[in-house]
Amino acid sequence: MPYRDHVVAVFGGAVSGAEAAWQLAQRGVRVVVFEQNALPYGKIEDGLPKWHVRLRDREEARIDEKLTHPNVTFVPCTRLGRDLDFEDVARNWGFSAILLATGAWRDRPLPVPGIDDYVGKGLVYQNAFMYWFNHMHEPDYDGPQVTIEDGAIVVGGGLASIDVCKAIMMTLVEERLRQRGIETHLFELDKGIDRVLQAHGLSFEELGLRGCTLYYRRRIEDMPLTPMDTSTPELLAKARAVRRKVAENAMRKFFFRIEPLHVPVDKIVEGDRLAGLVFRRTRVSDEGRLEQIPGSEREVRAPLVVSSIGSVPEVIGGIPMQGQTYKLVSNDCCMVEGFDNVFAIGNAVTGRGNINESMKHGRAVSEALAELYLCDSDQAIGDGIRATEDRIAGGLPRILRRLGRRQPPDEATRRRIFERVKALQQKVGYDGNYHDWIARHKPVRLEELLSREGSVAH
């Protein structure tokens, strides 16, 4: 095998990292996968809403299969920039190549001056919100805390912000139904709050809830909920109609509202807490430019603001940045500037933190998505994940060509690499038994708790 003596480091074990590791391992490359968390699943575990049980389990099993290839060595609980110095690893360890599959875990800042002073005081960002939502049922959960309150504001417009609205509404409705002596759960509500209420002979108005409101800077038909085909005026019109239908279906099923053509420009503060936002109305010009309308400001008070305007890669010391993403020499092979053996892959390149964004680069999504999404969107999200894998697999030959022109590390260097790797594994208590480690660190699932209580989860 031409790559037999090469050793490659992959930072990040989720969809992109696992696919890259597996593709390389099949070609005889020794791969060391460094994962910042105990589990390698990334946003499949912490960002994909927990109602996607079957999809989550299926995708995590695929990652497990790839990371247990004989040529892959797994190192959990080891974070680049915290436990390892990037420049030391890149310049001194002797890896043939380093692939950054670190994803996009840093929320894009809400563009309101001083707003971040109120994180945890009326403001929460999407990544922290969804992490809390996915794990807050666990008996030993000690992560970020969020109090869901009626009348919340969500700022966003993509599929992730729709998921935030769904999570808020399902939480509120479940509690109101419980107060009426009606027991339900997330997996029933995911089929549609409207269906659950109808089954109990109730209207949404009878619950006495206002619901949450999603504020988006453009029009509803501009929301990035499905791919946008602009090749002909007819296809553009059709894509916009599908996007509107997806949004309308979501609002109908989950009783939240969307306020388009609003951009946040200031904050409302009461005491030491954020009490809402000041929005300015916008318009979209004939050329598609977004324009703010002077003098159109309006105050919107809310007990909770969730910012869901996108995610970008985390800043890691030694990795050059260009704006909010890594600075690359060439988009063709995504080489990081200043290094001839460091490459960024997956969301570390695009800055897209929501796995659904991959649908823009993947398989065509037809009008049927408007009916499927928010009813049974596993297939659509799965297609997005497959598209991510396809992009990783398609990009690796260019990296492999560069690898083939490099001298592999000599035997002594390879030995030192794996001595360091073993020391890191021992430091975190990992003995090399991947499946045993995963079993010991997987959290308690909501469906397991419901099953113990006698409820039925799908």
Image (cartoon, rainbow, N blue to C red):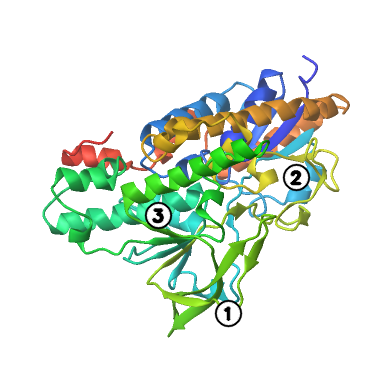
Residue 79, can we see it? Answer: yes
Question: From the viewer's perspective, is 28 left or right of 237?
Answer: right
Residue farthest bottom in this picture: 271
Q: What type is the residue that disc 1 sits on?
A: Gly
- Measured as percent of width and height from the top left, residue 458 is found at 28, 33
Q: At 32% across and 47% down in the image, what residue appears?
A: 253
Percent x, y for residue 260?
50, 60
Residue at far left of view: 181
Q: Residue placed at 68% from the left, 59% from the top? A: 289
Mark 2 / mark 1, whichever is N-terminal? 2
Instruction: Kindly identify the amino acid type of the residue bearing the numbered disc 3.
Output: Cys
Q: Residue at x 50, y 26 (%)?
A: 62
Numbered mark located on residue 165 in the image? 3
Q: Earlier in the sequence, mark 3 or mark 2?
A: 2
Q: Which label belongs to residue 89? A: 2
Dot 2, crowdedness within 10 Å: few (<14), some or many (≥20)? some
- Within 10 Å of disc 3 (Cα), the crowding (few <14, some 14-19, many 20+) is many
